[in-house]
Image (tube, rainbow, N blue to C red):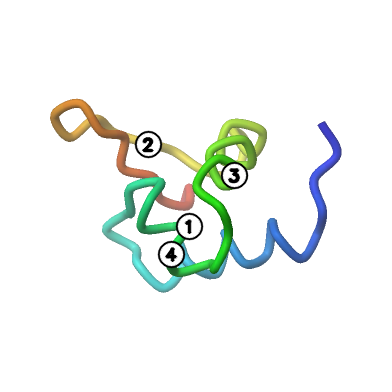
Amino acid sequence: MKLKKDKRERIKKALHENPKGLWVREVARNAKLDKSTVSRYLNAMGEEIEFTWLGRNKVFRLKE
């Protein structure tokens, strides 16, 4: 999947501003993108991000 640079950077910025992590919905709100778009991008950005489970939700953050 080819990621568009502007969307990728908006997602990374949202995660950078929230080092404790965000849910997909929160990333989408902060990046002003659709939730399904953010979900696809987060899956494709596996080498740059990490996630932990909080109940049934994934909390995403940038890898250090």
Contact? badges 3 and 4 (CB < 8 Å): no
* Residue beneath disc 3: 48
Q: Earlier in the sequence, mark 1 or mark 2?
A: 1
The residue lying at 56 percent from left, 47 percent from top is 38
* Residue beneath disc 2: 51
* Three-letter code, disc 1: Ala
Residue 58 location in percent, x, y?
A: 31, 35
Front in this rendered view, residue 29 or 46: 29
Residue 3 location in percent, x, y?
A: 80, 45
* Residue beneath disc 1: 28
Front of the two marks 2 and 4: 4
State the CA–CA distance, disc 2 to disc 4: 18 Å
* Three-letter code, disc 2: Phe
The residue lying at 34 percent from left, 63 percent from top is 19
Front of the two marks 1 and 2: 1
- Residue located farthest toward the bottom when viewing the structure as drawn: 17
State the CA–CA distance, disc 4 to disc 1: 4 Å
Contact? badges 3 and 1 (CB < 8 Å): no
Q: Earlier in the sequence, mark 3 or mark 1?
A: 1
State the CA–CA distance, disc 3 to disc 1: 17 Å
* Residue beneath disc 4: 29
- Side of 42 where 28 appears, left or right: left
State the CA–CA distance, disc 3 to disc 2: 11 Å
Front of the two marks 3 and 4: 4
Q: Could you tell me which secondary element the residue under label 1 belongs to?
A: helix
Q: Earlier in the sequence, mark 2 or mark 4?
A: 4
Front of the two marks 3 and 1: 1
Q: Residues within 10 Å of mark 1 (few under 14, many from 20)?
A: many
* Three-letter code, disc 4: Arg
Residue 37 location in percent, x, y?
A: 62, 44
Give above or below for 47 relative to 6. Answer: above
Q: Residues within 10 Å of mark 3 (few under 14, many from 20)?
A: few
